Amino acid sequence: MINLASLSFHFDVVEDRIRLIGNLDNGQQRVDFWLTRRLVLRLLDASPKLLQQTSEKVSRTPFEHQSAMAQFEHDEAQQAQLVRQDASLTHEGFQALLLRRLDISFQKEQYCLSFFVSDDAACFAFSVLSRQEMHQILHWMHKGCLQLKWGVSNSLFDLNEQAPTRLQ
């Protein structure tokens, strides 16, 4: 199993996919994955609930304001950008693997991403992220969806769609 210590993104209009590059320029084994529209949209769809359940700030906030608090945390994470988009790198000689599944777990204030490239139960690679880094990963995936015109909302965190209506 490969430890992905750094993650970079490339949005490929021709392939209509996002290329996730693990360990670019950090001296470790480089691994490239193709992220399909279906996989990324499912991940982004689940991300507000994931962050709502794993963020103490968001979970303590009244439901009708959780979207704003999640967006605040997200914006705050962008201040210290550690993940980068790679527009100029040549990908010749690097075969990208189709990512079939991406599992996310949360323990001890860290997210663990497990990357699967086949239908068997073996995890191919993993990456351990802080809350800030997880927000940055979601930011780049969302940005890729916007750039590739995959029909996502401009706002990543819209938890208020399910907020109860209250009469004053």
Image: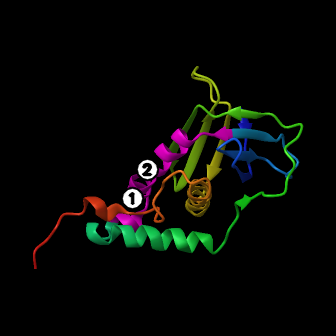
Residue drawn at (65%, 43%), measured in percent from left and top? 17
In the figure, is residue 28 to the left or right of 132?
right
Extreme bottom residue here? 168
Look at label 2 and name its amino acid.
Asp
Answer with the quarter of the image where residue 60 lies.
bottom left
Residue drawn at (58%, 69%), measured in percent from left and top? 77
Q: Quadrant of the C terminus?
A: bottom left
- Label 2 crowd bin: few (<14), some (14–19), many (20+), radius 10 Å: some
Q: Position of residue 18 (x, y in %)?
A: 66, 47
Q: Secondary structure at mark 1?
A: helix
Q: What span is in magenta?
A: 34-59
Extreme left residue here? 167
Mark yes or no: residue 46 visible.
yes
Instruction: Name the residue nearer the viewer: 72 or 99.
Output: 99
The magenta stretch spans residue 49: yes
Q: From the image, tell me which residue sits under label 2.
A: 45
**Is 35 above or below relative to 73?**
above
In the figure, is residue 164 to the left or right of 37?
left
The magenta stretch spans residue 163: no
Q: Quadrant of the N terminus?
A: top right
Q: From the image, tell me which residue sits under label 1.
A: 52
Residue drawn at (72%, 32%), measured in percent from left and top? 97
Q: Position of residue 159 (x, y in %)?
A: 34, 61
Look at label 1 and name its amino acid.
Gln
Residue drawn at (46%, 65%), measured in percent from left and top? 155
Q: Position of residue 14 (x, y in %)?
A: 71, 44
Q: Secondary structure at mark 2?
A: helix
Instruction: Name the residue nearer the viewer: 16 or 26.
Output: 16
